[in-house]
Amino acid sequence: NSSGDREKMSEALQRLSEEDPTFRMFTNEETGQLIIAGMGELHLDIIRDRMLREFKVEATVGAPQISYREAITAPAEGEGKFVRQSGGRGQYGHAIINIAPNERGKGIEVENKIVGGVIPKEYHNAVEAGIREAIAGGVLAGYPLVDVRVEVVDGSYHEVDSNELAFKMAGIFAVKEACKKANLVLLEPIMKVEVVTPEESQGDVMGDLNRRRGKILG
C-alpha cells in the first residue's frame, strides 16, 4: 500500500471512531499493524463495509482476535534473580515480591515495602518497571494480567554489578515465578444482551445462544 492509501485509511478510521465510541484503533508497536477493536465480529464487518462504501478504502483485514485477559486467583510469592558474570563488570539484580488478586476493576497496584536498603532507592523504579512490563505481557498465554496487587518485600544488590537493567529483569522474573503459583485463569469478554423475539422463534434463538456458550438468565 502507498502512503496515500494509509493516510486515506487512517482518516476513514478516525472519522468512524468519532461517530462510534465503542470502536477503537491503535498501532501494535511490535508489528506496526493497525489494530481495530470493536464489540464483536459483526461490528468489525460493518466497519470494514463502511470503509469500502463510504470512504472507498479497501483494506486487507486479518481474522478477528478475541481480547482475552489473564488473572490470578490466589496470593503467591515470587523471587526474581538476574545474575550475569562474564569477566569485568557483571549484572546483579534480586527482588522478592508478594502478588495477590486485586478487587475487580481496581487495576494494577505496585507497592514498595522495601526496608533497610536491601534494594537501593535508585533501583526501585527499575523493579517496578519490570513488574509492570511482565504484567502487561501476560504469563499464561501472552494476554495482559488484570486486577493484580504487588508488594516488593525483599531483595539484595551488589556494590559493583547492580544496575537498572538487572533490577528490571529481576522484577520480570519475580512476576513470572509468582504467577506460576497463583492459579492463573483466562478471562473471556462477555456482554449482557436482551433479546426480544416472537414466541415461535424462541427455540431457535435460545439454541443459537447456547451454541455460542451463552447463559440464559430468564
Image (cartoon, helix red, strand yellow):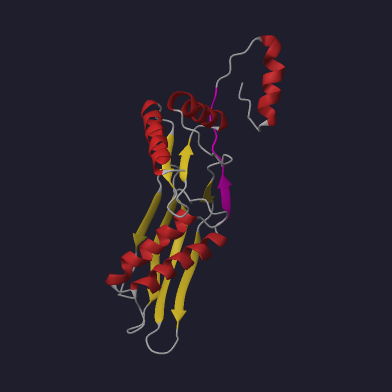
Query: What kind of secondary structure does the magenta stretch mostly adopt?
Result: loop
The residue drawn where x is 65% and y is 10% is: 198
The residue drawn where x is 56% and y is 28% is: 42
Q: Eyeballing the image, is 15 above or below 110?
A: above
Numbered-mark total:
0
* Identity of the residue furthest to the bottom in this view: 87
- Left or right of residue 159, residue 91 in this image: right
Q: 99 or 45: nearer the eye? A: 45
Q: Determine the image quadrant of residue 120.
A: bottom left
Coordinates of residue 16 in the picture (x, y in percent) = 40, 29
* Identity of the residue furthest to the left in this view: 122
Magenta region includes residue 188: yes
Residue 24 in view: yes
Magenta stretch, residue numbers: 183-193
Coordinates of residue 106 in the picture (x, y in percent) = 40, 45
Q: Determine the image quadrant of residue 171.
A: bottom left
Which quadrant of the rendered structure holds the C terminus? Answer: top right
- Left or right of residue 129, residue 68 in this image: right
The residue drawn where x is 54% and y is 32% is: 40
Q: Eyeballing the image, is 164 above or below 146?
A: below
Coordinates of residue 7 in the picture (x, y in percent) = 38, 39
Coordinates of residue 158 in the picture (x, y in percent) = 36, 82
Residue 181 in view: no
Q: 165 or 103: nearer the eye? A: 165
Magenta region includes residue 202: no
